[in-house]
Each structure stands twice: as structure tokens, then as C-alpha cells.
Image (cartoon, rainbow, N blue to C red):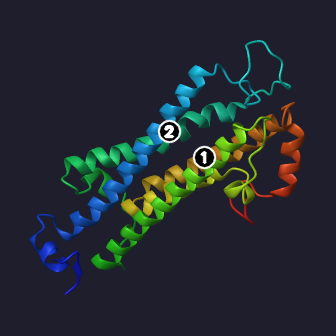
């Protein structure tokens, strides 16, 4: 019998008021809750920084109103249209999953279950293993995001404006965007559902049009434009090493 701190694990599981499926779903639920809670907290912190440090110019550098920093780049219409949709798809499906699963007592509601991935060839145990491993993988993605933000903030806090090029930034030029795609993919496996995969497709489409524009803005930045051009030559891939 396996014991943890002197406790019989099998006996605890037998006495648990939750079914096996509810136990697995509780792991997925808590992982999703931690993820979306952290995302909302980071968004609120970023909004607070913007309020305290003034507006941000099109080059991404905070500056007094009217100061000319770089050449203004027009935002493509496709970015304006896809941006709100992609950002909404990052937050809305997890919130809907949390609400529906909580009301269903740690069971996915019928409307969400209708979009389930095929599972005919998987046993209950195999599906539970996939969901649990995906939850652990999602925590790995959250660590990647935290590590990436650390390097981003370090570059922004330096005496001179710098382009972050260490840690995940030494592998791809937009590791935060890569992490978002990975998080949506792990959501699909955790929930065993098609909906997050639709989010992956939408986010990828948005990034395909927004990242070239963002990089063009960076290259026109009078403070870091030359540095960013050199960085692009050093790190060849935007999102996925050897692919994109």
C-alpha cells in the first residue's frame, strides 16, 4: 500500500466523496483557475503601470505627449479586427469552463461536452492520464511565462532602452506569444475539447498579421531600432524554433 506522511493513499481515495472522473476534473479545474487568475492579475498590473507612467507611443516607449519618437506606423485593419477576437478567446473559454464545471459539481456541462475530442480508442484511465499530464504541462507553460516576463522587465529597467535577448528570447523573438499558443493547446488536452484548438487557430492567425507589424514598429524605434534589427538576424524564428 502506498503511504504519504503515514496516510494510506488508497484508503483516502476510497473514502473520497468525489468520483474518479471528478477527481481528475478537479485537477484540471484548479489548474485552469490558477492560470486564468494569474492572467487577470498580470493584466491589471500592466494596466496600472500604464496609468502611472503615462501613454505609450507607437514605438512602445513611454514618452511625454507630443514627443516625436520614430516614424508612426499605421496599424493594419486585419490587426484591428482580429486583435479583440483573439484576446477575447484567451480569457472567455477558460472562464466559461470554470463557471460551467463549478455549477456541474466538477463535471463538464453538456454544452461543453458536446465539443469533446474523440475518445473512443481511449480507456478511462488513459484519458485521465492525458488530462493530468496536460495539467502538469500547463504549469510548465506558466513557469515559462513568468521566466519570460522576468527577462522582459529586466531589459526595460536598464539605464538605456534594450531589446530583451536572454532566456526564452534567445530561442524565439516572441516567447510570450509562443506560451499563449502552448497554453491554449494544453487547455484543449486538459478539457479534452475542440474549443481551445479554435482559439489556437484564431490566435495564430492574429499573430501572423500582428507580429510583422510589431517588428516593423520596433525597427523604426529611434532608441532600439538598430539593436532590434541585429536581434532579428541573431534569432531567426518568431514563435516556433525551425518552423515559424
Image vertical order of residue 151 relative to residue 8, above or below: above
Q: Nearer the viewer, residue 32 or 192?
A: 32
Image marks 1 and 2: residues in contact by CB distance under 8 Å = yes
Image position, residue 212 (x, y; %): 77, 43
| Alpha carbons under labels 1 and 2: distance apart | 10 Å
Sequence-wise first label, 1 or 2: 2
Residue for point 27% across, 47% down: 100
Circle 2 Cα neighbour tier, 10 Å, few/some/many (<14 / 14–19 / ≥20): few
Q: Nearer the viewer, residue 113 or 240?
A: 240
Quadrant assignment for the C terminus = bottom right
Image position, residue 202 (x, y; %): 57, 47
Direction from residue 33 to residue 215 in the image, left or right? right
Image vertical order of residue 139 relative to residue 177, above or below: below
Image position, residue 146 (x, y; %): 55, 51
Image position, residue 79 (x, y; %): 67, 35
Residue 119 in which image quadrant: bottom left
Direction from residue 120 to residue 224 in the image, left or right? right
Q: Nearer the viewer, residue 218 or 186?
A: 218
The residue singled out by tag 1 in the image is: 149
Residue 1 visible from this viewpoint: yes
Direction from residue 215 to residue 9 in the image, left or right? left
Q: Which mark is residue 42?
A: 2
Residue 162 in which image quadrant: top right
Amino acid at each position: 500500500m502506498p503511504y504519504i506522511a503515514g496516510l494510506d493513499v488508497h484508503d483516502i481515495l476510497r473514502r473520497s466523496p468525489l468520483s474518479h472522473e471528478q477527481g481528475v476534473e478537479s485537477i484540471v479545474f484548479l489548474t485552469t483557475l490558477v492560470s486564468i487568475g494569474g492572467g487577470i492579475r498580470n493584466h491589471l498590473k500592466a494596466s496600472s503601470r500604464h496609468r502611472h507612467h503615462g501613454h505609450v507611443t507607437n514605438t512602445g516607449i513611454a514618452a511625454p505627449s507630443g514627443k516625436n519618437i520614430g516614424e508612426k506606423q499605421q496599424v493594419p485593419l486585419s490587426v484591428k479586427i482580429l486583435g479583440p477576437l483573439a484576446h477575447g478567446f484567451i480569457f472567455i473559454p477558460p472562464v466559461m469552463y470554470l463557471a460551467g464545471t463549478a455549477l456541474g459539481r466538477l463535471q463538464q456541462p453538456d454544452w461543453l461536452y458536446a465539443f469533446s475530442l474523440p475518445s473512443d480508442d481511449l480507456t478511462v484511465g488513459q484519458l485521465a492520464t492525458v488530462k493530468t499530464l496536460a495539467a502538469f504541462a500547463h504549469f510548465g507553460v506558466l513557469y515559462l511565462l513568468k521566466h519570460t516576463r522576468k527577462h522582459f522587465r529586466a531589459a526595460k529597467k536598464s539605464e538605456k532602452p534594450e531589446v530583451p535577448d536572454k532566456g526564452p528570447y534567445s530561442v524565439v523573438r516572441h516567447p510570450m506569444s509562443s506560451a499563449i499558443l502552448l497554453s491554449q493547446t494544453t487547455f484543449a488536452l486538459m478539457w479534452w475539447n475542440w474549443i481551445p484548438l479554435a482559439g489556437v487557430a484564431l490566435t495564430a492567425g492574429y499573430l501572423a498579421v500582428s507580429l510583422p507589424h510589431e517588428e516593423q514598429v520596433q525597427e523604426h524605434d529611434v532608441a532600439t531600432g538598430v539593436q532590434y534589427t541585429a536581434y532579428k538576424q541573431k534569432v531567426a524564428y518568431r514563435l516556433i524554433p525551425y518552423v515559424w
